[in-house]
Amino acid sequence: MKSPVVYSLMVVLLFVLQEKNSILSLNVPTSSGYYQDGDFIIGGLFSLRVTNGYTRSRFDFGDKIYIPDHVHVVLTKNYQHLLAMVFAVEKINKDQNMLFNMSLGFHLFNVDFIEMKAVESSMSLLSGKSPPVPNYDCRSEKRNKLVAVVGGVSTGITVQSSQVLSLYNVPQISYGPFDHSLRDRAQHQSLYQFPMNPTALYQGIIQIMLHFDWTWVGLVVPDDIRGEMFLRDMTQEMTNNGLCVAFAERIPEFPVEDIINNELFMERFTFTNVSVVFGDTYSLLRFVYKLFCNLPFGNIWVTTSDWDITLLPFGQQQGYTYFGGGLSFSVHTEEIPGFNDFLKSVQPAKYPHDIFIQDVWSILFECPYLYQNGIKLLSPCEQNGSLATRTLPVWDMKASHQSYNIYSAVHAIAQALHEELSLRVEEGAVDRGASLTPHSWQLHPFLHKCQLERRVDKEKIVNKKISTTKFDIFNYQSLLNGTKTQVKVGEFEFKSYSDQCLSLNDKLIMWGEHYGESLMTPSAVCSQSCPLGFRKTALEGKPFCCFDCVPCRDGEIANETDMDQCIQCPEDQYPNKQRSQCLPKIMTFLSHEDPLGAILVSMALGLSVITALILKLFIQYRDVPIIRANNRNLSYLLLVSLMLCFFCSLMFIGQPSPVTCILRQTFFGVVFSVAVSAILAKTFIVVVAFKTVKPGSKFQMWMVTRFSNAIVVTGSLIQVCICTVWLGTSPPFPDMDTQSEFGQIILQCNEGSPAAFYCVLGYLGFLALLSLIIAFLARKLPDKFNEAKLITFSMLVFCSVWICFIPTYLSTKGKNMVALEIFSILTSGAGLLCCIFLPKCYVILLRADDNSRKNYLKQGPSRRQRN
């Protein structure tokens, strides 16, 4: 008998599990299992049925109480797990190079999905009797042949059986889903799992979401540690890849009375069309029963192969199509050599001690039971039936990944046994008369030193370096005959974050009846994609997957959908109307072919011709009194300078060059300074001649000539100095204006130094204002001998033009700035020409009598008297 302490622990464990699950009161019949003798016995814990013990809680729909009649059924596909173990044992026993001519046997139990039955079956394996006797070995043999146990299919079954087997240090290999919480060697020191890189699974699901642009996805997990870890890690991975969790639903334990009519639970599935469901068969059943009468039609489920809906027989009934179109990840495994032929050969007559084959055969071949002397028998018509004739999904000839795990686990145990036996032989234990048979706990060193690996090619699963990184992707489809099956549609291989590959054949995927045609991919987004030319803007209080779309600002584009920020176009490009791409800007400038340029050229040439004609007229009539009286030399100078002003405006038209940029502003400033200085000299001459000196004096004529020349030279030299400083410090240069005109690059001259440019204009304004003041003061001098009134009016026009020019120039952009400056030059020059010279031309040409010396002498005194 074992230690009393161990016995006490077993009793306490049984009591706690009984109180938690209330399973012992269900009158579930105790079974001795399926036993085959051998020198070493491997135990097996399988889940072959869904029983009323699992779903004993009722579904309450108003006044009607409904208990589904399909909950006490055999999961026929899970029977393949048991056959995989039988096949592996038979194959090892036929191998003469294994176990030194010793044989393997097995003791297989069906624990359904009841954790208490897993505890009971584990204790039966230890005690050798069913029902078990805790802490006793009831076998008739002298030794305990049990060396290891394979099982179970869910985390709950694995944990409960591990707590019992670990007390006796019996190795246990779980063929169910990998669970990080079971890696604690302190609590599960005898438990082994098949390794799986969870990051690879997360990335595979992420790549599926990215492939179909599913950014708003729900997560459904069991309400346990494994589910919480998946929820935490998956949420982080989704956030890192720009995906959002629409909802996170945790499926609690039974009973279901309090949750089956939870409206909030059902409402969450309307948030999105796609949900990722994580868990094992155990949690699958809880979830399916929860949805039993609340079918969220239209949802696409992304799951793992541990969550296989085709296991459930009621999944074939009419109306249960809400899993259609789902995608499932299954660990990639190789074909088990000879397993297909073995399945074809399985028959009740061949395995008469298999107590489970009876129920499976009855379902697969629809054979009624016969009773003879109270004993249940199968109809003899199907005793020789072959599994190869059965259709999906009640049976699948292809090995599931759980079957791979079981097959590999048996080979791992056999390999560990063989290595332990080899070690004993090498140490000479047989020669000393010692027992060759090892104890179960002696296999741990051989299982600890290596990882479990799914390998079938070399009949072993021990390798330190290999880990699972490849998944097969299946699509849950409804065939034409109504059969539900899973069709392989792609693969995913993960080596690292930077080295992963998703291979998917979209044409093979059928999304279910809700989506009609198979090519119509369902959408799972919180907000519709922002089109080209729009960017995303976050919604307050919402995840980043929920957003509004706003158009890009001027000068920016969005050349992809769902852009967070718009892209600024380069300076030499501009956005199209849709703001989806940048187009090259057109180079433009004020050219002679441009309508505005042609008009200005015509105006400049016309005014130049008029000025030239007036100059010719003044030269021709140079001796007439009106020309001589107004200083004809200054008139000639003024006309020539005005003609040059009109001509200089032509340099502003055409493509800018370094030469034209320098000449256009400086030449304009100097020539206009000469013109305005000449007008100022004319004004001073009038004042000096009639205010300080008597008419006709020689001193007057000498003084007037000298003084007028000094004014012109001085006024012009000051402007020349300003322009010289300008050119020496920061001269004008050709430049490109990329902002003024949409879609155009304006070629223009940059002033270099705006201050120098405005100094030139300011000096011109100073000369004009000085001439205006002096002319205004001399406006009452005799009409025949001064032109003060004309100068006053011309300076008013000149100053008005340039005063209006400055604010307008500052507010104008592009080639309109050049046109405005040309127009100001022509207008101010035309104002001087018209106001000062046209009246004289009128007198010369049309009033010749008034232009005679006799008439001037006659009318002069009377005028002087009036003034």
Image (cartoon, rainbow, N blue to C red):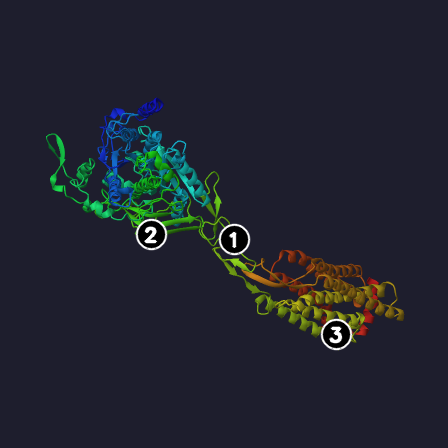
Which structural element holds mark 2?
helix
Amino acid type at image mark 2: Asp
Question: Cα distance, mark 1 to mark 2?
Answer: 33 Å
Vertical side of 833 occupied by 257: above or below: above
Check contact, mark 1 vs mark 2: CB within 8 A.
no
Residue position for label 1: 567
Circle 1 crowding by C-alpha within 10 Å: few under 14, some 14–19, many from 20? many
In percent of width and height, residue 775 lies at 78, 61
Give whichever of discs 1 and 3 has the lower sequence position.
Answer: 1
Left-right relation of 439 to 798: left
Q: Residues within 10 Å of mark 3 (few under 14, many from 20)?
A: many
Which corner quadrant of the image does residue 840 belong to? bottom right
Quote the CA–CA distance across marks 1 and 3. Answer: 65 Å
Which label was assigned to residue 506? 2
Residue receiving disc 3: 618
Q: Residue furthest left?
A: 373
